[in-house]
């Protein structure tokens, strides 16, 4: 990709609410920010109704532009609410925060550039313009949002577990036991481990960072 620090930054296309495309020109002043090596969560403002598309676009861009070590999880917060359809009550998903998406990332000039120019993104929440660094969410705010989505605040980093692997449990009620991975949920960063207790096999659901590979 062209470097955001280069003198000639190619315009990228941002989507509008009605599908029209308008070129967005950025200059080096807009992205001349202090880099942060700490992974934190930030809030993005999007066009209403484009939240899921922004999530897909950003995940795809992070992979195709080699930013997977800087841009991690992208979350669209949803909740289920009862609605009546054809005389029956059904549970329907709705956006908890319409027009907003949260992203876990290391804030650098390059990662800011990739995220900010993702189609459908209109800006970072907490940024005051003139290239100022956006303010990250508080840990308590992140925990509340992720837990409501059945996710953990922890991140497994580059550790990749596969069913059939043996692991040692290093945290929680089963600390010290050895078990075999039976199921991996890479979205929630959890896994199920088969362990033997009192000569009987049982299954425990654990976070990635509660186990070590053997």
Image (spheres, rainbow, N blue to C red):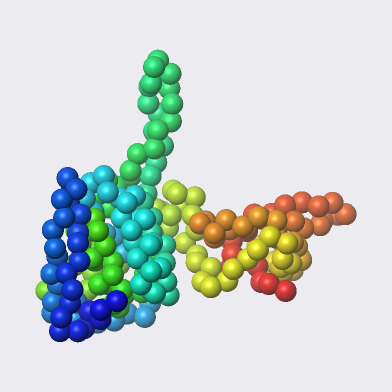
Question: With 7 as the anchor, is 59 left or right in this view?
Answer: right
Q: Residue furthest bottom?
A: 6
Closer to the camera in the image, 211 or 171 = 211
Vertical comparison of 29 with 55: above or below: below
Residue 153 appears at what percent x and percent y?
Answer: 47, 62
Instruction: Determine if residue 85 is in view.
Output: yes
Residue 45 appears at what percent x and percent y?
Answer: 23, 56
Q: Residue at x 66, y 71 (%)?
A: 212
Q: Residue at x 42, y 58 (%)?
A: 143
Q: Residue furthest right?
A: 199
Vertical comparison of 7 with 68: above or below: below
Instruction: Determine if residue 103 is in view.
Output: no
Q: Residue furthest top?
A: 87
Q: Residue at x 22, y 79 (%)?
A: 4
Vertical comparison of 80 with 118: above or below: above
Quarter of the image for residue 112 reads bottom left
Q: Residue at x 38, y 44 (%)?
A: 78
Residue 120 appears at what percent x and percent y?
Answer: 24, 55
Question: With 88 as the anchor, is 214 left or right in this view?
Answer: right
Viewport quadrant of the N terminus: bottom left
């Amino acid at each position: 990709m062209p470097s955001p620090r280069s003198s000639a930054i190619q315009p990228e296309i941002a989507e509008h609410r009605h599908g029209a495309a308008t070129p967005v020109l950025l200059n080096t002043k807009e992205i001349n920010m202090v880099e942060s090596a700490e992974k934190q969560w930030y809030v993005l403002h999007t066009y209403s109704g484009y939240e899921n598309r922004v999530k897909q676009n950003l995940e795809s861009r992070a992979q195709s532009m080699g930013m997977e070590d800087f841009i991690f999880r992208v979350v669209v917060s949803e909740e289920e609410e009862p609605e009546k359809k054809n005389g029956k009550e059904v549970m329907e998903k709705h956006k908890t925060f319409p027009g907003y998406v949260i992203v876990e990332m290391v804030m650098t000039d390059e990662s800011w550039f990739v995220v900010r120019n993702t189609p459908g993104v209109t800006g970072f929440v907490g940024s005051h313009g003139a290239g100022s660094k956006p303010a990250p969410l508080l840990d308590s705010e992140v925990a509340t949002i992720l837990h409501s989505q059945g996710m953990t605040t922890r991140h497994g980093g580059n550790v990749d577990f596969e069913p059939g692997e043996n692991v040692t449990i290093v945290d929680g009620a089963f600390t010290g036991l050895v078990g075999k991975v039976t199921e991996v949920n890479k979205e929630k960063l959890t896994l199920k481990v088969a362990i033997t207790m009192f000569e009987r096999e049982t299954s425990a659901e654990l976070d990635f960072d509660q186990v070590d590979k053997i």
